[in-house]
Image (spheres, helix red, strand yellow):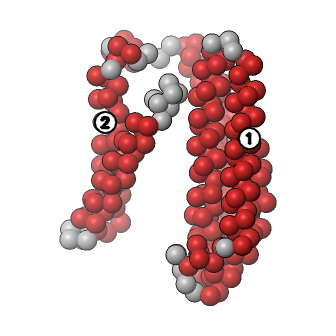
Amino acid sequence: MRGLGDSTRPLVFIGIAAVTNIILDIIFVGPLNMGAGGAAIATIIAQAISVLFGIVYLYRRRENFIFDFKPGSFMPQKRWVKELFRIGIPMMIQMSAINLSLSYVFSLVNVYGVTASAAVGIGGKLLRLFIMPQQAMSTASTAMAGQNIGDGKLNRVKTIVDMTLAINLGVMALSAIIVFMLPEPLIRVFDKDPEVVELCTFYLKIHMFSVLGHVLRI
C-alpha cells in the first residue's frame, strides 16, 4: 500500500494490531498468567489480525490493485525472483551485519553490570524514537522516487531526494538539541536511578554523532 502511495491505511491496520496486542498482553500475562509465552502469543495474534485486515482490504479493491489474487498469480516469475534477489541480498547482508555487530556490542556491555545494560537499553529506545521520523521519510521518498522513475520523470527524483535529505537533517538537528539540552526528563520516564540517567545521557550524546551517518545512509 505504501508503494502505491497509501500510507494512511497501513497506519490504521498497525494501530489496530498495537491496541489488540496491548489488550491481549494484559489478559494473557495478567489473569491467565501465561508469562512470556502469553506475550508472544498475543503478538502473533495481533500481527495476524493486521495482516488479515490488509488482505481483505486489498481483495475488496482488487480491481484497482495490481495483484488480482488468482491462484496463478501466486507463482513467482523467474525474472522478478532474480531481480528481488539482486536488490534484496545486499540489503540483507547490510542489515544482518548491523544487527550482529549490535548484538556483539550489547554482549560486551552486559559485562559492566545492570546499570550499563539499562543505560544502553534506554538509550537505544530513545535513539530509535529519534530515527523513526527519518525512516518514515525514507519510506515515503522511496515510494515517490520509484513511481516517478517508472513514469520516466527523473527530474522529480532529485527534488524528492533533496527534500528528504533536508527534512531528515532538520529532524536530526532537533533530536541533537533535545539530547544535548533536555535528555534527563526523557531518560527518567524509563528509569530514575541517578547512575543510569548519568550514564545514559553520556551514551546518547556520543551516539548522536552516528545519527548523521544514518541520515546520509537513508
Instruction: Please tell me which residue is depicted at 70% across the width and 46% down the height of the picture.
Output: 168
Q: Residue at x 20, y 68 (%)?
A: 32
Vertical position of residue 169 compared to residue 159: above or below: below
Picture quadrant where residue 64 is located = top left
Element assignment for label 2: helix
The x and y percentages for residue 28 are: 25, 64
Q: In the figure, 23 relative to 184: above or below? A: above
Q: Is residue 150 visible?
A: yes
The residue furthest bottom is 194
Question: Disc 1 residue type?
Answer: Leu
- Name the disc covering residue 165, or none: 1
Q: Is residue 143 left or right of residue 90?
A: left
Identify the element where label 1 is drawn: helix
154 and 71: which one is in front? 154
Image x and y of residue 37, in percent: 33, 62
Q: In the rendered image, which residue does mark 2 sit on?
A: 53
| Residue 169 sits above or below residue 121 on the image | above
Residue placed at 64% from the left, 47% from the top? 134
Please name the amino acid that badge 2 sits on: Phe
Crowd class of label 2 (few under 14; some 14 to 19; many from 20; radius 10 Å): some
What residue is rendered at 56% in x and 16% in y? 80
- Tell me the distance, in whole angstroms, between the alpha carbons under discs 2 and 1: 33 Å
